[in-house]
Image: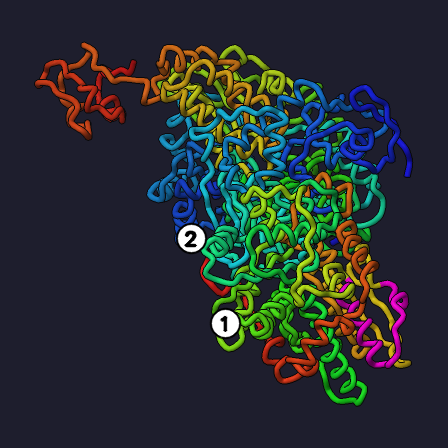
Amino acid sequence: MKLVKITINNKTLEVPSDWTIMQAADSANIEIPRLCFVKDINETSACRICVVEIEGIKSLKNSCTVKVADGMKVKTNTERVKKAVRNNLELLAANHHFECWRCPREHNCEFLHLLRRYNVPNEMGEDPFHERKAVISNITDALVLDSSKCILCGRCISACEKLAGTAVLNFNERGFVTFVGPAMNHPLDDAGCIYCGKCIQYCPTGALKEKDDVDLVLDLLEKGEHFVVVQTAPAVRAALGEEFNYEIGTNVEGKMFRALHDLGFNDITDTNFAADVTILEEGHEFVERLKKHLANEPTPLPMFTSCSPGWIRYIEIYYPEFLDHLSTCKSPQQMQGALIKHYYAKKLNIPVEKIRVVSIMPCIAKKAEAKLPQMEVDGIRDVDYVLTTRELARMIKRRGIDFHKLEPLTPSSPMASYTGAGAIFGATGGVMEAALRTVKEQLENKPFDLTALAGLRGVDDGIKEVEVEVTGLKLTVAVVHGTKNVPEMLRRVKENPGKYVFIEIMACTGGCVNGGGQPVISADTLSRIDVRSERSKALYDIDDHAKTRKSHENKEVKNLYDTFLKHPGSHLSHHLLHTSYKARSFYTKDPVK
Amino acid sequence: MTKEQLLKIRKKASEKLLMSKLPHAYRVAIGMATCGVTAGAQPVYDEFVAEVKKRHLNDVFVASVGCVGECALEPLVEVTDNQGVVTTYCKVKPEDVEKIIENHLVNGRIVEDLLPSKFKKGGSSDANARQGRIALRNCGIINPEDLEEYIARDGYLALAKALTEMTPEGVIEEVKKSNLRGRGGGGFPTGLKWSLAARNKGGQHYLICNADEGDPGAFMDRSVLEGDPFGVIEAMTIAGYAISASQGYIYVRAEYPLAVTRINKAIEKAYEVGLLGDNIFGSGFHFDLETRLGAGAFVCGEETALMASIEGERGLPRNKPPFPADEGLWKKPTIINNVETFANIAPIILKGADWFNTIGTEKSRGTKVFALGGKINNTGLLEIPMGTTLREVIYDIGGGIPNGRAFKAVQTGGPSGGCLTAQHLDTPIEYDTLVNLGSMMGSGGMIVMDDTNCMVDVARFFLEFTVDESCGKCIPCREGTKRMLELLEKITKGKADLKDLQTLEDLANSIKDSALCGLGQTAPNPVLSTLNNFRDEYLAHVVDKKCPAGVCKDLIQYYITDKCIGCGRCKRGCPVGAITGENKKIHVIDHNICIKCGACKVACPVGAIITA
């Protein structure tokens, strides 16, 4: 690319001609504030916070999308620019519902950050603290949209369209009364939303958030009427630390368990255990289907993984014709819940009615999943409460626990034991890698060389295809992350019958490490660091250092089968650990008035 | 169609239109644009058709034509004889039709009491005002749905010339030389704009006609589309050829049903005879044209929002650059011109840039169409050479202010423009002079105000419009105009202080400086311009808590002066019983009861009721 010379605040820079002014400024550490801009996701030049003065141009220009030109003279620090930025922030403030102490983004609100930095007065409007009407849409079990905190930057809209591929959200009405929501203000649970929470991750304020159950769980723990068992998903430990200023990608597993202990949970288990169980159940199911397929019996192949409830909701809504391809396995969260209640309870000798299961998940969709009618066994719910990683952090903060000072804890429960295979469930490609480790070894009856699986890891490609050799057969498997990529994958499946045998699909790009329930990272940081890779590294690091790295070698899992389930795919397994799906439609209800 | 065929049609159609072989013939043209139809032209037209048929007047041709211009005098009927002598009848009712036919068409006697002079309150004669029209050359003269009548008036000669004698570069060069500037408001040189798109060689190019006219009180584009749709289609075909666009769109608001119908009929007709589609005039040039209806959002008149709307997206503007000429509709090079700009193209190509350069001023060539409204005697549509002064427009053409009141200001450029005052009356109307005075040419809305208009209230009205029409995308416009409106309301209620006035001005400047699109950047103009020209009036509201024009209800009281003759009409007109007084004695208003509706003032026959 051709280089051009520009000056920013009298500093001369030589930058590629296809750069934006903002890129050039960033490269020279010249700070430009921003609010609506998220690189590659939302480049709409709407907020007018990143405005700069360009010599020869009458009005101020946004630096996020305007490209540099040779000889361009830019000023970012003049009174005129500062005044415009402050004015625009004040206008936003005049129409924002400030109740920061109750806001999930109290500690990392991008809007509040700017208000502080520019020392913005809040004197406009008739009621400067509660101007914007609270139009709270909390009809779903998972996601809450609070318009009173919305600054209409449009980042959620773009994230929904460009990452989830669902385009559920958009602006309704116009001008001062504009609000974000599903088309024509349809209720969120009836608008094709899959609860992946990409909108939350890209919201600069607290307008989009999970349905907060912190109070319920704190009450549960305080009352002490139940034996409360907690489970933590693989990806939580790779991100929780960020809420306490640890570097992105720090594994805080030990501190996390100690915090859960200090919060008063009666027993601590690890969803990684159920991940190992999943491999055995799903692996068994896959082998059965593959055998039928090889015997030319009709069977739905490729088989799709079923761990990601966002993906499950996606296929139920958008591609129900593929439902029989889904593995019937419940997600690890639900398996763990069912096993705690129907297996572990007996071991602990506690009546099942006394037990409550709380799961800590990197996910929004898990909240809705736990509430699905079929997620129970013999009238007993698998999981009672689902908290996101963020909610756990909030709980720790609210209880005044100093996270940094916590001594690591290793839980003693057998249901907290896991292998490296269970740990990597949280990263894209992890489930497939874990499954192949077990399936290949079991089918070939010889130890499997772990280095043989290349091409399943990494976040760069939304669809990864890998050819693996099992018992001399060449099989194509695929890994998809981000529902945005699902239509393309399904197109390939349709056009190549018989080619693919097994496909891992995760709703979120990067897998669960980048789930909608994970700590929210500012747009600015997102443009510099690939959070997905950093958090994944923590999980692969656990795997690298694990004593056992294949699910079928987990002693406690073996024990589970030997003493209880008998074998994968057994009648009891099906009763406890498998489920069914149904096609869903949307826009069936009337719009909210 | 070939050029020879065109010329043949032209000869025949021209004879027909001018009735040159029929010494006793008359053409009766009835103004049937939206303005005419609203005023009741349809039954007049029907009556003419029926009556002419009944009387077997074979040499009388009744035609439905576009807007004649003098909207205040509609329904208008123009009778033309075969010598070209035109007689205009005003405010014609169906019952007048027989009289006109009997006296004028049968016996050659003009019906005096329907002539404009009987109705007009000053202003020059209509016929003079229509000299030198370019954009409106056919409006009110031809039947807009009749292609042959269009051809009779030199229609499609320009396209034939462009396609058969000129290169695309030659066309652009001619338009450049003409110094034609965009008539939509900004005044960007049209030829230069075209060359920017043509510079992007190869690939799909698009051409768009912006007919999303939305300024309050403006109806120039509507009149052109209703009165001369072929003029726009021909020009677009020429422009398409110049920038090598094979597809054009006319983006017209759905609230203009008659314009939409006429333009669609005209497009259909043009396809039928080969003036759209493949191989036009045997040149190998292909051009498709279709209409796209806007749903009425003002912001969709902004070119990038308009393109988003055509693409099926929410009508939101996007940042420029990239400009549409580089990245427009579906990211392809696109030229967007306004209706009136296109209406100038065919005459420029046909008569040449040199001819065009003889009209107007050095920096603003040609003419401009204005929709004159507000406190003016002759409301209507006019086309004047650039450089005409406001005084000429308001007093000579517009006939001055009704009821002998004093001229106070004129708002040009609609909600994006500003006001000009009495001291600017002798300013020539040009793009740059208007901008220098804090207003703008705009698309041509011209609203005249007299001393009964409160300028703060006027600014509030325009802000209300902008707040309502802001798309909501960028913060300054969405949030800022709303706060400005709140401050203006505070001022008109007498609750504001000097700090509020300062905040208003700061806010206005900040919005102007940082808003995303043209709509937002110009939204504060009505406020800034009234602050600039009528600061005293603002101060009167803020400091003295008075509304000098007597408009802002919260700041005025109604009083009955000793002019009162005690007739009791005010008392009977008062809806809340606030007025007391005996017969033939001076009446009194109880200010505790008075709701300041003004009904008494209207009812008083002697002007004894005043506001203060």
Q: Earlier in the sequence, mark 1 or mark 2?
A: 1
Q: Which residues are magenta?
A: A429-455
* Relative image position of residue B313 (x, y in whole percent): 62, 50
**The image quarter in which residue A508 lies:** bottom right
Q: Quadrant of the N terminus of chain A?
A: top right
For marks 1 and 2, give the one nearer the viewer: 1
Q: Residue at x 55, y 23 (%)?
A: B508
**Please, which chain is the residue tagged with disc 2 on?**
A
**Residue lying furthest left:** B582
* Relative image position of residue A13 (x, y in whole percent): 86, 27
Q: Is residue B17 visible?
A: no
Q: Is B73 placed left or right of B481 in the picture?
A: left
Report which residue position mark 1 lands on: A351
Asked if marks 1 and 2 fall on the same chain, the answer is: yes
Q: Are marks 1 and 2 in contact (CB under 8 Å)?
A: no
What amino acid is labelled 1 in the image?
Pro
**The image quarter in which residue A313 lies:** bottom right
* Relative image position of residue A461 (x, y in whole percent): 81, 58
Q: Is B403 placed left or right of A48 in the picture?
A: left
**Please, which chain is the residue tagged with disc 1 on?**
A
Q: Is A118 placed left or right of A468 in the picture?
A: left
Q: Main secondary structure of the magenta part?
A: helix
Report which residue position mark 2 lands on: A593
Q: Is residue B359 visible?
A: yes
